[in-house]
Image (tube, rainbow, N blue to C red):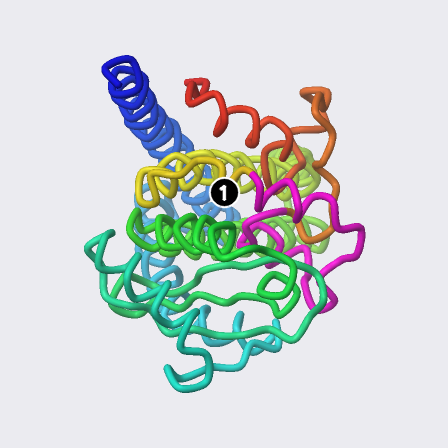
């Protein structure tokens, strides 16, 4: 009995250490991401004829306004694109009670519950904060998983809501779009810009070279950063979800069943893949994925997640 208590205490401490470590990593990545987006917009302003101070100021203001305006509508758009339909308590009392009870345990309002008619087992959460959050579950998930496994999945998604991952990932997606758009504009402006003197011609050639490099690399860099943040938050949600249920095997077994299903979520896209609890395209099921391939995964390799959940000793 005493040994079990010691093991459980060690497990909980390990989980909290993982949560702290992942929050640290995500903060660093998001700061770098924001600076990168502002720097790219500043370069665009400079090319358009603004001085350095004006460019940085306008880039910062535009980035903040763009992100704020965009993320207010992203959850509704996402749910619609995935074919998610809202349900009331009387439609599925058992699932509603599971979500409601776990929400009380997590200390957050009960999110709106949506069902996606799809045989592939999966789920995701979205929204701008815990008061305006939604959780979507596929019919395949409800049919294939046991009650304890479904509870583990719901706890994982509620952890995303509790930790404001839903807001974080919305802002990151918006910034990715902004970086790609800015890179394209920068490249086009420099390609069609005419020079009137030797000095301006030298500047034009230099600016064109920078624009071409950024135009090619910026979308790639943006995607790598976005996916790195997404993978970090999955580990965090796994750890926090287990703390909610106090039953690691529920989530571990659920992930194992999800990874064992070979079909894909029909309406999932590469823009929304990172939202799901597991990669809807099944590109990360290998136990040992080379590091360079992991850079482009929306989720950590699912075998590693299962191993860490069961061992209770997440890597930091």
**Is residue 146 in sight in this rendering?**
yes
Kindly tell me whether residue 201 is visible in this rendering.
Answer: no
Residue at 41%, 41% in the rendered image: 237
In the image: residue 130, left or right of residue 192:
left
Instruction: Tell which of 280 and 225 is nearer to you.
Output: 280
Residue topped by disc 1:
251
Circle 1 packing at 10 Å, graded few (<14), some (14-19), many (20+), is many
Above-or-below relation of 280 to 208: below
Please report the residue visible at 59 percent of the width from the left and 33 percent of the height from the top. Answer: 300
Q: Residue 199 location in percent, x, y?
A: 59, 34
Residue located 36% across and 70% down the image: 72
Q: Residue at x 69, y 70 (%)?
A: 118
Q: Nearer the viewer, residue 208 or 296?
A: 296
Q: Which secondary structure lies at badge 1?
A: helix
Please state the horizontal and vertical placement of residue 180, each as a whole percent of the image: 60, 51
- Which residues make up the magenta segment? 253-278
Q: Is residue 258 left or right of residue 38?
A: right
Frontmost residue, 231 versus 97? 97
């Amino acid at each position: 009995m005493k040994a079990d208590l010691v093991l459980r205490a060690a497990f909980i401490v390990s989980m909290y250490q993982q949560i702290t470590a992942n929050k640290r990593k995500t903060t660093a990545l998001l700061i770098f991401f924001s600076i990168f987006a502002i720097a790219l917009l500043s370069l665009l302003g400079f090319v358009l004829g603004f001085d350095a101070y004006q460019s940085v100021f306008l880039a910062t203001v535009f980035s903040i306004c763009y992100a704020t305006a965009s993320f207010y509508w992203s959850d509704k758009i996402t749910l619609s694109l995935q074919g998610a339909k809202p349900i009331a308590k009387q439609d599925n009392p058992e699932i509603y009670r599971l979500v409601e009870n776990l929400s009380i345990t997590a200390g957050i309002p009960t999110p709106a519950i949506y069902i996606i008619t799809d045989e592939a087992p999966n789920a995701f959460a979205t929204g701008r904060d815990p008061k305006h959050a939604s959780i979507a579950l596929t019919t395949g998930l409800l049919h294939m998983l046991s009650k304890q496994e479904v509870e583990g999945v719901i706890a994982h998604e509620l952890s995303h809501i509790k930790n404001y991952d839903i807001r974080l990932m919305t802002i990151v997606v918006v910034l990715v779009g902004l970086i790609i758009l800015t890179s394209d504009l920068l490249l086009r402006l420099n390609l069609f810009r005419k020079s009137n003197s030797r000095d301006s011609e030298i500047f034009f050639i230099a600016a064109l070279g920078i624009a071409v490099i950024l135009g090619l690399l910026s979308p790639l860099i943006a995607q790598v950063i976005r996916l790195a943040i997404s993978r970090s938050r999955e580990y965090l949600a796994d750890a926090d979800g287990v703390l909610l249920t106090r039953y690691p095997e529920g989530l571990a077994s659920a992930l194992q069943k999800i990874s064992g299903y070979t079909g894909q979520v029909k309406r999932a896209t590469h823009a929304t893949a990172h939202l799901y609890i597991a990669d809807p395209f099944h590109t990360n099921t290998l136990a040992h994925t080379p590091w360079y391939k992991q850079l482009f995964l929306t989720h950590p390799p699912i075998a590693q997640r299962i191993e860490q959940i069961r061992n209770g000793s997440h890597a930091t």
